[in-house]
Amino acid sequence: MTVTEPQQLAYIAGQAAEARLRFELETEGMTLNIGPQHPATHGTLRIIVRLDGEQVVWADPSCGYMHRGYEKLAEVRKYQQVTTLVNRIDWLSSFCNEVPFILAAEQLYEVEAPPRAQWIRTLLFEMGRIANITLFLGEMGVQLGAITPVFYAFRDREHVLNLIEAATGGRFHPNYDRVGGLKDDLPKGWVEETKAVMDKVREFCDQMEDLLLGNEIFERRMRGIGVIPARVGLGYGLSGANIRASGVDWDIRRDEPSVLAWKDCDWKVWTHTDGDSFARYWVRLQETREAAKLVDQLCDGLPSGPIMAKMPARLRVPKGEAWVHTENPLGEMGYYVVSDGGPSGPFRCKIRSASFNNISILPWILRGVYVPDVITILSSLYFILGDIDR
Amino acid sequence: MSALLAPALAALAVLPPVAAVDVTTYGWVTALKVAIVLGVIPAGALILGYVFLLKMMSHMQSRLGPMEAGPHGVLQLVADGVKFLQKEDIFPSRADRRVFAAAPLVVLMSTFLLYVVIPAGPRAVVEDLDTGIFFALAVSSISVIGVLMAGWASANKYALIGALRAAGQLIAYELPMVLAVVGVVIQAGTMSLSGIVVAQANYEVSVFGLFEIPKVPYVFPQIVGFLLFMIAAQAELSQAPFDMPVAESELVAGYMTEYSGFRFLFFFMGEFGSAFALAAIAATLFLGGWYVPGMSMDAVASDIIGPLVLGGKIMLVAFFIFWVRFTYPRLREDQLQSMAWKVLIPISLVNIAVTGVAKVVF
Amino acid sequence: MSDAPTDDQTEDAAPPPPDPEREELVAALRRDLGDWLIEHVNANGDLWVRVDRKAWLKAGEVLREKHGFDYFCFLSGIDWLNNAELVQRYEQVWDPDAEAAGDGAADEGPYVGGRVAGGDTRFQVFARVYNVQRKLGITLKADLDDANPSVDSWVTVYRGADWHEREAWEMYGFEFAGHPGLRHIYLPVEFEGFPLRKDFALLARVVKPWPGLVDKEPVPGEDEEEGAEEAAPA
């Protein structure tokens, strides 16, 4: 079922008009807090909704329950210390948060990491993507009521986490990237293990496709729910699978020049035309398969060599500003790092996190939507609280 | 159930003060039957809960489930029960106390009343009512009141939403259930559950007049009715894909949100007790109840084997109920209602028409 | 991969030729905005454009409607105030040798020098938008008044700017004229002050200087010298 943009807009206009009509009729509505403690919000997000029966009249997300002030904290740390902080923004794919920051720092330092380090970074980046999105594939079922797929997700993602732990020492917070390269080289036999695990990941994706995508109830709950037209999504800054599900062919790995190894591999960007929750789920499923394919190629083509560039001692970072962004599992994550030439770390570190923009669309999209569909839309937009609140 | 009857009677007979009383009087027998039923309900709930909820679900989700309490976790639910019983009895500050306290009792009472008519043997039934199945369906509707009471008295918006959803859903799915049963009643010619078991034992299907298959349970001619009944039972039990009232990811626990301690235990027992009872009714109506070919209709042995047979059939039916529960996502409230009114009821009406015509013609 | 050109660097080789596509874009913007486009930096495969704050909204409209920059990346602010004393208090490792090398920021005066499209004032608002069809991005900057940092809101042009402007107001105190409701997004309602400003002291650092004195107790059986205190930088 393909939905054209006029149909999408008509659907949304109809819902909004209905909601407005009920509001104007002055029926007694109910104001409900979804969160901050709630099973459906992945963390402490509070959405204040005004309901008329089971329909939402308006919704107002209130974030900040997990705000840790990373931008200020980064200003009082050295570049090497910021990686520990930044791991904890999107904690399901921690390594992916380090990479753009380290790349920005390397731009400022005017240092380039050796090829082996760039390839290993890409490898771990894609594994972080798999670890993150497999969880999404499972827990989307839980939000809809199918409690079984999430256990398969946890079971299969354990393998990926074990690999990340073997390489970096940390399952969740690797803290592995250094300015100029990496902390350590990969352990012996890691590459072969990774390829075996990728087979399991592909099997898992097939399982999810059978279990959820083929399920009629899943389709009825997801198709046509939470349609985001492309122009609206771009205006809000939706990124990642959210915008690709609305038909926009934009993937930073392919479209922006980068020192990492994506350009050396053969892979595809997946888009979908519908822009509804089903499309977002579908795109993420295909992306996981693509990530497994990428990991295989990266494992095969891993160059040998040093993993750390020669950095002079007593390094002074020249003044300047650098902006680096990458296609993180949640969307586009970028760091705008300003250096003032001083001895300490960044002068200003603006963190552009994907979920902040992804959630800003909620007041617009939740009007006229039923309460169960609120949960579906929230889950399909897929955010991590640490990413919203930094 | 009957297995306990004989030694219990013997024990009562030897106690001196009681020996003077005639224990075969209606009063004593009924009291004994009620006591047995009161024991069966938690036992049945425990067995269902353990086998299906704890172990089958866990194994299907590639995990082990509880393993600590007792060998392979068999005592886990007992431990849970004790835990619930020793908890503090909490009332939300703005809750309506009396209604809040009464709600789980209403739900549990409707579950208990269901067991009155379920036959587990030719004589092992608490009361063989002539309107057996009608009575059972009627009392199972009382739980709707209990759910509404729970949701309203909790003074909690989530509970209220859950209760309203439950009311709509439970009422909507009563109809397909009743209409599915009507097909069986037409075929059996009686509403009494014991009568339906006997009818299935005597039911013969003639295949094109060539030969006859004896003792066919109604699941075969009434396959449509069986499926309708199973779907409606799934909805009556608020199990996925119809668990909107207790949608965990949205409403935390729906109408049960504010309940803790032994009141929550009552709801839990009500849920699993109803599952046991509805599975028993499905087994009786469609699978032949306590009868398998080879059993006699009168012997005392049937009173002992009958419950075991019925137990086996209950497990089979419950297997499907729980298997569907943790595989499917849940339907949204309006999709659920439209399925009941626009799909299930028309099919069940057609089923009744076809059954009626077939009964008269063949 | 060279950095954006700064005041202090000597250029050994000729800089790479500027990207023609971006130059063309800058020329088009210059036609649209005239004098209000103050400077631009086209380097490193990226484009920075600084406009006058009166042209902030017009620049956004022009970029979106005429040049197809419909993807809103982010909007935030920079506080260019350089307070050496603050840095010293925070970092306890002020290196006098490095400062003597002439690279120190302290002798730049009140504002940090060498900024890319850097501002003449303390506060600067900056935003980034993309044209996903042409795969181009542009960073727009505008200097704001020190005493009264305010600028037009971009909400009518980019809907996503709503939340970003709320955050910028909350963190820096920028007033966005025309925003439907500037209220706190991360911080509680009663919060006083603007945290990301340089003169807002990070309380954790004020209370306990970093990295703090490390107490080391002697391991039983080892020498007493092991128990010396050290104030080691992390």
Image: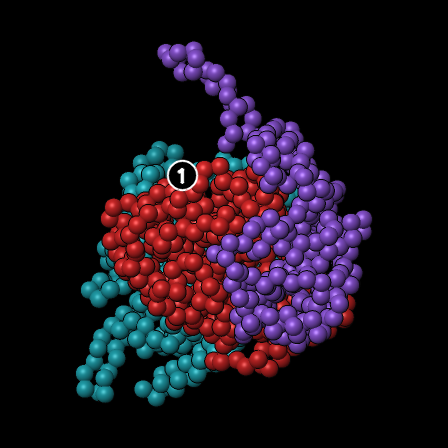
Chain colours: A red, B cyan, C purple
Q: Is residue A313 visible?
A: yes
Looking at the image, residue A1 lies above or below residue C194: below
> Residue B171's x, y, as percent?
55, 67
Q: Residue at x 30, y 67 (%)?
A: B288
> Residue C196's x, y, as percent?
67, 45
Which of the 4 image quarters holds residue A148? bottom left
Residue type for callout 1: Ala
Which of the 4 image quarters holds residue A266? bottom left
Judging depth in this view, the residue of C191 and A33 nearest the camera is C191
Q: Residue at x 37, y 62 (%)?
A: A291
| A28 relative position to B137: left or right | right
- Residue linked to disc 1: B79
> Residue C148's x, y, as percent?
80, 51
Judging depth in this view, the residue of C98 and C171 nearest the camera is C98
Q: Residue at x 32, y 72 (%)?
A: B219
Looking at the image, residue B362 lies above or below residue A25: below
Judging depth in this view, the residue of A196 and B253 nearest the camera is A196
| C118 relative position to B334: left or right | right
> Residue B184's x, y, as percent?
38, 74
